Image (spheres, rainbow, N blue to C red):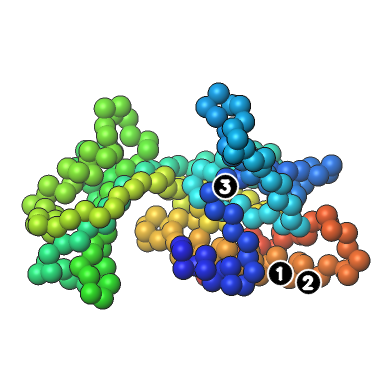
Amino acid sequence: VAWLAEQAEELGVELYTGYGAVELLYNDDGAVVGAATNDVGVAKDGSPKDTFERGMELRARTTLLAEGCHGSLSKEAIAQFNLREGRSEQTYGIGLKEVWRITPEKHQPGRVEHTVGWPVDKNTWGGSFLYHLDDEGDTLVACGYVVGLDYTNTYLSPFKEFQRWKTHPAIKPTFEGGERLSYGARALNEGGYQSIPKLTFPGGALIGCSAGFLNVPKIKGTHTAMKSGMVAAEEVFKALQALPEDAPEDQIVDVSGYEAAMESSW
């Protein structure tokens, strides 16, 4: 991510790190014309501190929502423009991940292991991954466990199930003598193709996991997210190129061709 940020900034892209987009902006016709960022320097009681700064309105001819899974602005756009009409509802899971440095004799660069099931029971969707990273000069592995958020056992802890998975006789030896370097968790879209909503709306479009492009059977989300961003950018560029020279600054562009372009891309 840091490397991609550098490439983008070299091309003139402005990045606002540390800020969140908290509100969609609409014109009089109801089309999206941008987003507003959050206020900063606010005390716990809501009062402004000495460091208070008002959020900014970022206006554009096209607004692409790339918030990841279940983003607040994406949910607003989906509801506002009824983008789920005729589509299945999205379903969700939670993925927990760790990065370890293991002992050199156990490291097998490029090795991939996937499991389904244990330690969750037969009524709960769960599965794991274990990747031996091919990082020259290091012995890193990435591991994780995903649990579908439709589980019915209210006492189930996805984090504890992940830790229990590491005790399996086929898994445990990998980590013995190793060191955990980092960990994290994130929500995942798991509805699949039938749960992808309409992708465009007046003034913008959904890309990446905001649209639910995670391919669950292939365990590929980054690939499809990046592809959707590339396809959307191409459609936006074509729309901007088609604008007349005397177009007003606040005129939005039509990117309705993005959905068809995405369907025919792969």
Name the amino acid, label 2: Gln
Q: Is residue 166 above or below residue 9?
A: above
Indicate left or right for 67 with 240 as reference: left
Q: Position of residue 168 (x, y in %)?
A: 12, 49
Residue, far right: 246
79 and 177: which is toward the camera: 177
Callout 2 touching callout 1 (CB < 8 Å): yes
Crowd tier of the residue under label 1, counting other residues whose Cα lies within 10 Å: few below 14, some 14–19, many 20 or above:
few
> Could you say which quadrant of the image residue 230 lies in?
bottom right
User: Looking at the picture, how far across and down is residue 232, in whole percent?
Assistant: 63, 64
* Name of the residue lying farthest toward the bottom: 136
For this rendering, which residue is in front, 57 or 76? 57
Residue identified by numbered label 1: 237
State which tag comes first along the sequence, 1 or 3. 3
Kindly identify the residue that appears in the image at 61 percent across and 45 percent down: 21
Coordinates of residue 98 in the picture (x, y in percent): 27, 52
SS type, badge 1: helix
Residue at left 55%, top 23%? 45
Asked whether disc 1 touches disc 3, contact meaning CB atoms under 8 Å apart, the reply is no
Q: In the image, what residue occupies the spot 59% across and 39% down?
A: 51
SS at badge 3 = loop
For this view, does 204 lie left or right of residue 189? right
Q: Which residue is mark 2?
A: 241
Residue assigned mark 3: 19
**Amino acid type of the residue tagged 1 in the rendering:** Phe
Q: Quadrant of residue 228?
A: bottom right
Near mark 3 (Cα within 10 A), the count class, few <14, some 14-19 or many ≥20, is some
